[in-house]
Image (cartoon, coloured by chain):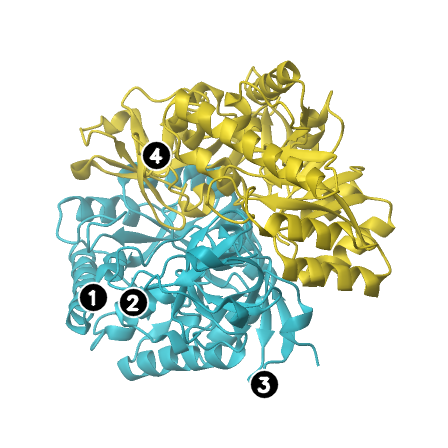
Chain colours: A yellow, B cyan
Amino acid sequence: MRTIDEIGTPALLLEHGILERNLERMRAQLGRLGVALRPHVKTCKSIEVARLALAGQPGGITVSTLKEAEYFAAHGVRDILYAVGIAPGKLAGVANLRKRGIDVCVILDNAAAAAALIAGAEQLETVFPVLIEIDVDGQRAGIAPDGASLPELVRLLGESPRVELRGVMTHAGKSYDCRTAIELRDMAERERAGVVLAASRMSAAGFPATVISVGSTPTALAAETLEGVTEVRAGVYMFNDLVMAGIGVCSTDDIAMSVLVSVIGHQPDRGWIITDGGWMALSRDRGTAAQARDQGYGLVCDAAGAPVPEDMIVISASQEHGIIARRDGGSVNMGDYPVGRLLRILPNHACATAAQHAGYEVLANDGAVVATWPRINGW
Amino acid sequence: MRTIDEIGTPALLLEHGILERNLERMRAQLGRLGVALRPHVKTCKSIEVARLALAGQPGGITVSTLKEAEYFAAHGVRDILYAVGIAPGKLAGVANLRKRGIDVCVILDNAAAAAALIAGAEQLETVFPVLIEIDVDGQRAGIAPDGASLPELVRLLGESPRVELRGVMTHAGKSYDCRTAIELRDMAERERAGVVLAASRMSAAGFPATVISVGSTPTALAAETLEGVTEVRAGVYMFNDLVMAGIGVCSTDDIAMSVLVSVIGHQPDRGWIITDGGWMALSRDRGTAAQARDQGYGLVCDAAGAPVPEDMIVISASQEHGIIARRDGGSVNMGDYPVGRLLRILPNHACATAAQHAGYEVLANDGAVVATWPRINGW
């Protein structure tokens, strides 16, 4: 039996049991709401994780890069939504995948991108399936569900023989700013209502939507109804993280991913324990900085995954050094944290932390390292 | 001729001419001070860049991980300082490299790590060269140059037949908080004086130091004398970044590295341009947040590398989206930034941004993409 003592530090650990429990929770929630799940694989970037997430689901995934699309297609996934506004320079890559029989659907939110897509489709002698991106929260991309430009864009796309206009999608990224169950529920409803309104305006313009897609982990888990929605995209729910725990979507016990680090020294006068887990292993993400409970660069757990009794966080990180201290600034018995001791750090943001690693060391419930699952990065 | 139009976005660009100029500047500075350069390759993680940095130098490098040591050793580097306090679990990896004839020297700052190293050396039937890490600024690891524990640690290491105690090293990480030329000069002197004091106390304890090592890009460039120092470690100087520009160590014209992105949409009412360069391509590093000039997630330049006239920064980033806006919040003519336009983003922190990429697209002075240099990540 291989154990975590043998894998070297820093390393990315994945608790198989917690992962399965998180997947089952989302499966149950969307089953109850009667909506299909299209897992967003930008968090895991691993075919092994995606296969578990796809169990009992229709089989389609969401990606954030062409490289993810190519990787998952190479591993047998044939239904892919590329959910970042398509850049004209990426159309050839999408067309290449489509020629291989992979159903890649793209998104866009403006007439210039639509014109570039139509011109690209003509040049590449293909047809692109498209969803129009809707903005429900003013956070990022998308067009207003009630604005004048939506029907214009619907007609521009719908009337082109180079486009298969499938519907609308949105992402309520602002759900990450929610702090209460009521705010989360209201945000989920805003996401649902916005995209359903956009779909009804598509129909009114003569082009009914067959895909009506929403997605974010907080709204997916908080939604009380998803009436009118055909699919939900979510990715972080697989692993969870401290940001999700801070929002109230999960507890720290539900975080499947952690970074294994070794103690390399101490600064007893300052109450610091120094480890080999710096920002290169943890990421620079400080997503909990604006939450009620700022977790620094991560929450410190023992080698078995339970938070240490002193309530310690990574207060500072350089490239390959992490500095651990009590949250309250109090003193720590350094003898309890000897040089060489293994600790686990729960991450602020699963997507960002996982991206710093080439794979997952998968742990069974008994602590055995039962597999190493590679993941991809890059574009 | 390959151009940046053909490489896809996001991508990491490296201006060969600026890189060479930055290398020459450090070479001239240390030549003037009469001290050897031991480049820190944790920033570049590329043998091609390291070879340029080593030209005219003694040939030794500094690394931050065992994987870097193994990679550079595989490419012919034979003199390596592993400048992160050694974890007991990594001694076998160091011993393996040493058995292949690579001179890997480790560092530590405490008796427990020293005892583990001596025990490991006995078990592995080897001898480890060691530098003692000195703390000159209270920022991270190291022991005080004037404290009682230094001579004790010197004797513990010096008297062991399993240790070749070579000397002392320090890193004035607090130089990143300097804001004026005088502060930088004083910090460089504090770094020098601290490590020289530690070396003299080593000698007094009966173990003269042959290596007296300092290093950080700001102090290396600001030092007026390095008397008593034998070598300087620095890495960021190769590329420079917005943090260095904010400290006053370089200008934005001296930043050799940038991230190429494509415009994918707009939010005209909010003055936003949306690109495909999110935090996955830029990193989550916000190193300029506490500086006088907060650069957001990066400074926006045109495709040729000159800052755009509207003075725009990346004000927000999600995984694969960057939001660009004027620093002053003013309006932008969106027609000047059409969908598909290429832009370059100068990074806050070269080490963090480069780590998000698998390699560098190397640009000649005429803008041609003349090479792709791979880089490594992980441990």
| Position of residue A345 in the picture relative to residue B262 (left or right) | left
* Residue under label 4: A339
Please state, as top left, top right, bottom left or bottom right, where the C terminus of chain A lies in the image: bottom right
Q: Amino acid at mark 4?
A: Val
Residue B52 image point, x, y percent: 51, 76
How far apart in space, not on screen, are marks 1 and 3 (Cα)? 35 Å
| Position of residue B292 in the picture relative to residue A48 (left or right) | left
Q: Please tell me how many numbered marks the rendered image carries.
A: 4
Circle 2 — which element? helix
Q: Amino acid at mark 3?
A: Asp
Q: Residues within 10 Å of mark 1 (few under 14, many from 20)?
A: some
Callout 2 and callout 1 share a chain: yes
How far apart in space, not on screen, are marks 4 and 1 (Cα)? 35 Å
Q: Which mark is residue B366?
A: 3
Residue at image point 54% right, 70% down:
B335
Q: Earlier in the sequence, mark 2 or mark 1?
A: 1
Q: Are marks 2 and 1 in contact (CB under 8 Å)?
A: no
How far apart in space, not on screen, are marks 3 and 4 (Cα)? 52 Å
Q: Depth check: give the residue in front, A293 or B83.
A: A293
How far apart in space, not on screen, are marks 4 and 2 (Cα)? 36 Å
Q: Amino acid at mark 1?
A: Arg
* Residue under label 1: B179
* Residue under label 2: B246
| Position of residue B2 in the picture relative to residue A234 (left or right) | right
Q: Residues within 10 Å of mark 3 (few under 14, many from 20)?
A: few
Callout 4 and callout 1 share a chain: no
Q: Chain of mark 2?
A: B
For marks 3 and 4, give the one nearer the viewer: 3
Q: Are marks 1 and 3 in contact (CB under 8 Å)?
A: no
Q: Which mark is residue B325?
A: none
| Position of residue B115 in the picture relative to residue B180 (left or right) | right
